[in-house]
Image (tube, helix red, strand yellow):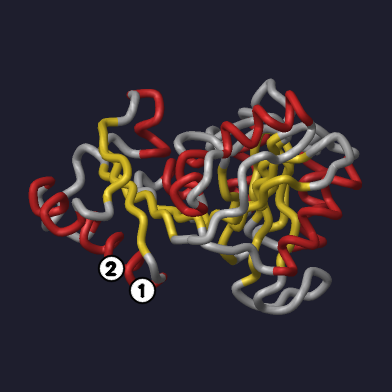
Amino acid sequence: MVSTREAGRAFIDQVGYPVIVKPDVGVGATNTWKLEKDADLDAFYDDLPAAPYVMEEFIQGDICSYDAILDSKCEPLFESMTVWPPVMDIVNKDLDLMYYTCPDVPEQLRALGRRTVKAFGVDRRFVHLEFFRLARGRKGLGRKGDFVALEVNMRPAGGYTPDMMDFAHSTDVYQIYADMVAHDARRLPEPAEHFYCVYASRKDGHSYARRHEEIMERYGWAMMMQEEMPPMNWPQMGRYMYTARLRTFEEVQAFIEFVQGA
């Protein structure tokens, strides 16, 4: 927890710059910053927010969420993984957002997610747990590719992500949740087909190579959702969003480039 300037410096002496400071209770990386030098640290403490803040070691890697619907025994009725960029950079650097739900959950993440919900004693909930997948090995944390805990959210993922889980897993998470509440069980069968579901958005003031009509002509067959987002979501989610269901990661990369390429 952020307390005194001296405590912040002591923490940085231990882990080194950069560090992340963010609200202890927050969403969408709002009011989250990277401190890279003493001047940044002093500026933060000179105008310390009233809300409780935490300071964290800076980690390089993808953010991978373990999303699950749990029964009364903390056992998962549904599990999924979504891969996210650093949302802090999307907001603070005014970048375009892209993220995707995967067709499966790596066994290491599945095991960590299940252990985490049991450690918290979480039952009868839809949870959204975030982990870093290390881009390089880090002493005390793990090897390249390992998952490192970031935060727990005892709620579903935000935005249209639950719908993306539906599209990726050919299912209905809302029905699974309702059956959990009413019957403490999953009644929907396990789906036969799984896909990538990818979200790519555009912001005002950015320049793009392709027009909306070109995107729909190329990817209309795969488009699951396409609309203008509510204004409150523009800083994180973009103003115009395109959500497609695709078979391979290579198709996901090509879709993102087609939508967001300048």
Estimate the x, y position of residue 102 in percent, counting from the top left: 52, 60
Estimate the x, y position of residue 246 in percent, counting from the top left: 36, 62
Determine the secondary structure under disc 2.
helix
Q: Is residue 111 left or right of residue 248?
A: right
Which residue occupies 69% across, 45% down?
A: 68
Which residue occupies 21% across, 61% down?
A: 258
Estimate the x, y position of residue 86 in percent, counting from the top left: 51, 53
Which residue occupies 39% across, 71% down?
A: 248
Residue underneath mark 1? 250
Query: Which three-letter amino acid code belongs to the residue tagged 1?
Result: Glu
Q: Quadrant of the C terminus?
A: bottom left
State the CA–CA distance, disc 1 to disc 2: 6 Å
Name of the residue lying farthest toward the top = 50
Determine the secondary structure under disc 1.
helix
Do the numbered discs 1 and 2 sit on residues whose CB atoms are within 8 Å? yes
Are there few (<14), some (14-19), or many (20+) residues within 10 Å of tag 1? few
* Relative height, residue 52 to residue 216 (above, below): above
Query: Which three-letter amino acid code belongs to the residue tagged 2?
Result: Ala
The disc placed on residue 215 is: none
Which residue occupies 45% across, 37% down?
A: 160
Q: Quadrant of the N terminus?
A: top right
Relative depth, front residue between 192 and 260: 192
Are there few (<14), some (14-19), or many (20+) residues within 10 Å of tag 2? few
* Relative height, residue 211 to residue 241 (above, below): below
Estimate the x, y position of residue 103 in percent, counting from the top left: 52, 62
Relative depth, front residue between 137 and 98: 98
Q: How many marks?
A: 2
The disc placed on residue 254 is: 2
